[in-house]
Amino acid sequence: MFNIIPFLSYVFAVTFTPGPNNIMSMVNASKSGYKKTFKFILGVFTGFFIIMILCSFFNLILFNAMPKIKIFMGILGAVYMTYLAIKIVKSKEEVSNKDEKHISSFITGITMQFVNPKVILYGITVISNFVIPYYKSNVAIILFSIFLAFIALISTSCWALFGALFNKFLSKYRKPFNIVMGLLLIYSAISISGITHLF
């Protein structure tokens, strides 16, 4: 029987906690407002949906291949997130800045999903443990993928709204805020890189 309470608990706990998607949404919205950040949020939704579909249909292949590609993906993801963190820390208040447009773009939202092994591991875990044992039809898999991507959309939207609502406060302390958010993104980068497991 499908375990809905553990499934929803896991999904909400993982999706709503601080991570690259949520941090970037809050930073972008605090600078550009929710409306301009929505491109990034849609990118996250799209990338998340694609990852969930891939994890669903290639669950066993990804599960077997993950140990081999995890290190490469972790390093690639860490480099990309560190690059974004540097852009955040160095960014100024003008929202017309080219770098700020880049980090709030639709493409950045999609790209972040493919270089973040945590999203792929989340997809493999949630699909293999909660979905595949009970639902194997293509329709069910697509519906679950849409649902999971929709939860990611709600999560990033909530973080973006928080950033937009506290825009005046955050703009007053722009530099410290950018540094803290940049450091959180670097922390996320370090945690997905696998470096911590070497010590």
Image (spheres, rainbow, N blue to C red):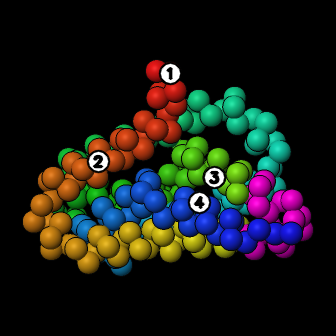
Which quadrant would residue 27 be assigned to in this image?
bottom left
* Mark with earlier residue (3, 1): 3
Helix, strand or loop at mark 1: helix
Which residue is painted at 38% across and 69% down in the image?
Answer: 159
Label 2 sits on what residue type? Gly
Residue situated in front as seen by the camera: 25 or 7: 7
Residue situated in front as seen by the camera: 199 or 72: 199
Which residue is painted at 37% across and 58% down in the image?
Answer: 23
Percent x, y for residue 156? 45, 68
C-alpha separation, residue under disc 3 versus residue under disc 1: 22 Å
* Mark with earlier residue (4, 1): 4
Question: Label 2, on which residue?
Answer: 182
C-alpha separation, residue under disc 4 versus residue under disc 2: 22 Å
Question: Label 3, on which residue?
Answer: 122
Question: Label 1, on which residue?
Answer: 198
Whether label 2 touches label 3, CB < 8 Å: no
Which residue is painted at 64% across and 69% down in the image?
Answer: 8
Say which of marks 3 and 4 sits in front: 3
Say which of marks 4 and 1 sits in front: 1
Dot 3 crowding, Cα within 10 Å, few <14, some 14–19, many 20+: some
Label 3 sits on what residue type? Tyr
* Mark with earlier residue (2, 3): 3
Instruction: Name the residue furthest top.
Output: 199
Asked if residue 36 shows in the view, the reply is: no
* Mark with earlier residue (2, 1): 2
C-alpha separation, residue under disc 2 versus residue under disc 3: 23 Å
Specify whether 98 is left or right of 21: left
Residue situated in front as seen by the camera: 11 or 116: 11
Please give the count of numbered marks on the rendered protein: 4
